Image (cartoon, rainbow, N blue to C red):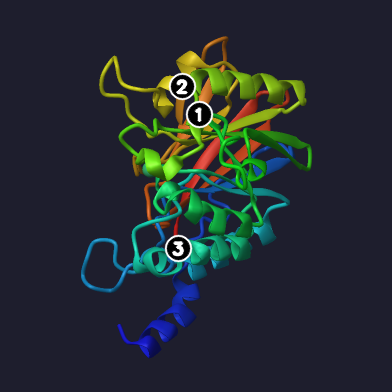
Amino acid sequence: MKVMDRRRFIGTAGFGLTVLSGALGRGASNAPRLTILQTNDTHSRIDPFPMDGGRNQGLGGVARRKVLIDRIRNREQFTLLVDSGDIFQGTPYYNLYGGEVEIEAMNRMGYEVGTVGNHEFDNGIEGLEKTMPLAKFEWVSSNLDWSGANALAPLVKPWTVREVGPFKVGLFGLLCELDGMVAPSNHQGVIYLDPVESARRAVRDLKREGCNLIVCLSHMGYGTRSENEQLRDDRLPAAVEGVDLVLGGHSHTFLDELVELPRRGGGLTRITQQGWAGMRMGQIDVSLSAGSELVMRQAPVWVS
Ligand SMILES: [Zn+2]
């Protein structure tokens, strides 16, 4: 596609936006609603997929993602925009600019919290020292100990709390094992911690903070295949109490609806994931029932 064509294409793209306006309905009650918007594994996809006849052609792109985000923010009173990791690697933007473009795009879209994926380490600690400080959003990662990575240590917290209207949202991050995923020389000074222990500690802290919604930004992947496999999203509810929602990543899984699993200690953990490449965002609407139960629904928002 020539530059002019591309520009014209982006200029007119607004007419084809897939917005599920009102698709979730307002419900019978006037209970306040929090709309969480999630992406994961966007993998340096700044532009939409090219119109080359491929099955993803025309999908994605940060310009159209921003239009959709702005539209939803204008419509909804309470929103939260988060990412579940692997924002880097996949297109020449990362090879040429080392991640600055991805972070700057996220700043302009108004991301609030993100977690670290394994590909964030692709340019090593040095690469992260150049890019992480550019973010206007917060980084959370509860099962990595950053204290040996001097300049980065103050930038990454195990968890954070965002107060949005009546919602006090606690968010923590989890990452898959570094072993076999990230070369040791690329994460020098960063130590991997047990994800179950780290998650339990984070939940305990967030409960103590008085959070009424606890969200895990997970880059562990969805879908457990064997007994001995490491912790993945679908195994978390049985191992960790108190997590209300897992916004996942890493396995590039498109989950069209929230997967509800019974969790340790009672209640449900909901899990979702939005595929990859920024082709789709997740819109998860959360409200409190009259009995103070969390009610959640997801609508996928295709960036097209
Ligand atoms: Zn990953």
Quadrant, the C terminus: bottom left
For marks 2 and 3, the one nearer the N-term is 3
At 68% from the left and 37% from the top, the residue drawn is: 160
Per the image, label 1 sits on a secondary structure element best described as strand
At 37% from the left and 51% from the top, the residue drawn is: 276
Q: Which residue is mark 1?
A: 270
CB under 8 Å between discs 2 and 1: no
Quadrant, the N terminus: bottom left
Where is residue 236? Give x, y as percent.
46, 21
Q: Which residue is mark 2?
A: 236
Where is residue 238? Give x, y as percent.
46, 14
Where is residue 258? Give x, y as percent.
46, 34
Q: Nearer the viewer, residue 185 or 94?
A: 185
Q: Report which quarter residue 227 is drawn in.
A: top left
Measured Cα–Cα span from mark 3 to mark 1: 34 Å
Graded by Cα atoms within 10 Å as few (under 14), some (14 to 19) or many (20 or more), the crowding at tag 3 reads: some
Does residue 241 sit above or below 223 in this rendering?
A: above
Q: Nearer the viewer, residue 176 or 203?
A: 176
Where is residue 269? Give x, y as percent.
52, 24
Measured Cα–Cα span from mark 2 to mark 3: 33 Å
Q: Report which quarter residue 105 is drawn in.
A: bottom right
Amino acid residing under circle 1: Arg
Per the image, label 3 sits on a secondary structure element best described as loop
Q: Report which quarter residue 213 is drawn in.
A: top right
At 73% from the left and 25% from the top, the residue drawn is: 290
For marks 3 and 1, the one nearer the N-term is 3
Q: Is mark 3 within 8 Å of ligand 1?
A: no
Q: Which residue is mark 3?
A: 98
Does residue 250 sit above or below 264 in this rendering?
A: below
